[in-house]
Amino acid sequence: MSSQTPGTTIDLGAGLLLTALALVWGGSFFFAEIALREVPPLTITLFRVALALPVLFLVVRLKGIALPRGLRIWGAYLGMGALNNAIPFSLIFWGQTQIESGLASILNGTTAMFGAVVAGLLLKDEPLTPQKLIGAALGFVGVAVIMGPAALTSLDPRNLAQIAVLAAAFSYALASVWGKSFLAGQPPLMNALGMVTGSTVLMLPVALYSDGMPRFDLSLPVWGALLGIAVLSTALAYLMYFEILRRAGSANLMLVTLLIPPVAVALGAGLLGEQLGREAMLGFVIIGLGLVVTDGRLPRAVLGKRQGLR
């Protein structure tokens, strides 16, 4: 067993969990692409959170975690459900009606850069350092490479879809600040359940108003995709998320954002026949470099080696 303190290093178990989390979160883009064949985006969001809700509730009860009773905490869960589930899920699923699942996952990879900037502006204990600004700048350069110069001169549905996915990433960033500000004292698994409960409450009237009553005469592949995105990419993903957070810490957990796009691109290419252009792949490399700079460990390691050679 490693002598290092838990929460600061990635051991074999945490590494396997990190890989599995990338697979189930990367798979969410693939599942959504299949579900969109028969189900509109807002209803997919409703299915995703509503079907995940009983799974998380069962885990919380088995763990013996008490449900909070105060209106304030449930209001905080409602806000978290909006920022971390209802808004970004809906934007990403709508975006996937116009762009490939792999491209959506790459654009979603900007979440870490948005998160660093938003936290730096809104949280006193996470200052906006030059390193984070450089990482964010690289991320936005990667987005610009993906979208191309045409995005500045025309707003076709494809461009709007890419903007929607970027807006989803920004919503995720706001959610991280919201969670740290209002939910820091609650058990992590209860936070997951409360958040999914809040997003289900929000999405039920929205989806019913927008799309009408959900259809249940769906094909088996679409039902499989809905169950996959709810049980695997939401309920199971959050269970792994908090276990990785406990074992390896939040900085190591951020590395999953580097692993999700390759998974989504591979699934989209292998099973859906999607092909991304050079711009998308180059943009992913630049965004990935931005994530590495934001994380800070590789630059520190390189600097340490140089100092050691002097």
Image: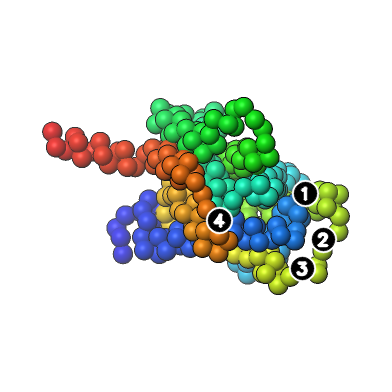
Gap between marks 4 and 2, in whole Å?
28 Å
Nearest to the observer: residue 63 or residue 56: 56
Q: How is the image coloured?
A: rainbow
Can the viewer see residue 195 in this picture?
Answer: yes
**Callouts 1 and 4 close, C-beta under 8 Å:** no
Mark 1 residue type: Leu
Circle nearer the viewer, 3 or 2: 3
Q: Secondary structure at mark 4?
A: loop
- The residue that label 1 is drawn on is 202
Mark 4: give few (<14), some (14-19) or many (20+) Cα within 10 Å. Answer: some
Nearest to the observer: residue 81 or residue 227: 227
**Callouts 3 and 2 close, C-beta under 8 Å:** no
Mark 1: give few (<14), some (14-19) or many (20+) Cα within 10 Å. Answer: some
Task: Return the mark for residue 214.
Answer: 2
Can the viewer see residue 114 in this picture?
Answer: no
- Give above or below for 35 relative to 124: below
Quadrant location, the N terminus: bottom left
Quadrant location, the C terminus: top left
- The residue that label 3 is drawn on is 218
Mark 2 residue type: Pro
At a point 38% along the width and 37% down the height, the residue shown is 293
Q: Which of the marked residues, 4 or 3, is nearer the chain's N terminus? A: 3
Q: Which of the marked residues, 4 or 2, is nearer the chain's N terminus? A: 2
At a point 16% along the width and 38% down the height, the residue shown is 308
Circle nearer the viewer, 1 or 4: 4
